[in-house]
Amino acid sequence: MNNLSLNLYTSFCRQVDALEKTRVKSDILFSKKYLAHKDINIIYSGLFIELVTIFERFIEDLFIQIATNDNAHPAANVKSKIQVKTKKTCSGIIKGDKLYVDWLPFDKTQKRALHFFSVGRPFSLISNLDANKLAQISTIRNSIAHKSPHSRQKLEKITKSINLKTQSPYLASLYLRHIYRSNPSQTYFEMHYLIIKSIAHQLIIK
């Protein structure tokens, strides 16, 4: 793994690991009754949005890095199909006339990568299973950020198998706090955090 890729991935891990540490500290404070239910739900919502935002920034940075530097990725078969000299120029090409670019759901990134990189690598190498996991993560994030009836309905499809208060405005947080397995004990937030870290690692090493 070369320095460019390693530095990018190391910085990403440092940021998301800090979020996970904050989550653990918050759970401890909640268990000791220093935080109310509303407080812990708000914290979980904020942490999850930040988690996804950091991951999207990582995807964008990696995408632009590979597009502007042939030696940015350790895999010899990961090459840019176009010649772009600066990150600013590359960012402008990607955005076009849009103010911002959606990197999730991940199929948007994979389709974009086909225009920029040989066979879309490394983004095309992420399996459909993992891409579907990211689609679910995007759905949860959108339900927190937008709070529309449509996003709520999509979230309820994810949480329907769990006995939660479906009328609660903090349904996403209740889901993220829910223990999905007991040995070792892990919440759904932890599960998604680990999925995101795993996919980020795959993008660097494939």
Image (tube, helix red, strand yellow):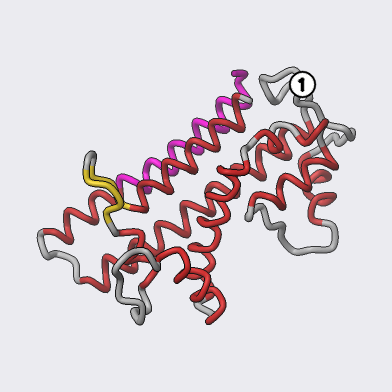
Horizontal arrangement in the rendering, residue 183 relative to residue 107 (left or right): left
Residue sitting farthest toward the left: 32
Residue located beneath label 1 in the image: 77
Give the residue displayed 68% in from the left and 57% down from the top: 102
Q: Which region of the structure is painted magenta?
A: 1-21
Image: 113 above or below 77:
below
Residue 135 in the magenta stretch? The answer is no
Instruction: Tell me what residue is drawn at x 29 percent, y 68 percent.
Output: 163
* Residue at position x 57%, y 55% in the image: 135
Considering the image in quadrants, where does the C terminus appear?
Answer: top right
**Residue 124: percent from the left, percent from the top?**
71, 37
**Which corner quadrant of the image does residue 37 belong to?**
bottom left
Q: Nearer the viewer, residue 198 or 161?
A: 161
Residue 119, picture quadrant: top right
Q: Residue 157 location, x and y as percent?
A: 47, 68
The majority secondary structure of the magenta stretch comes to helix
Going by the picture, which residue comes out furthest to the front?
Answer: 161
Quick check: is 10 in the magenta stretch? yes
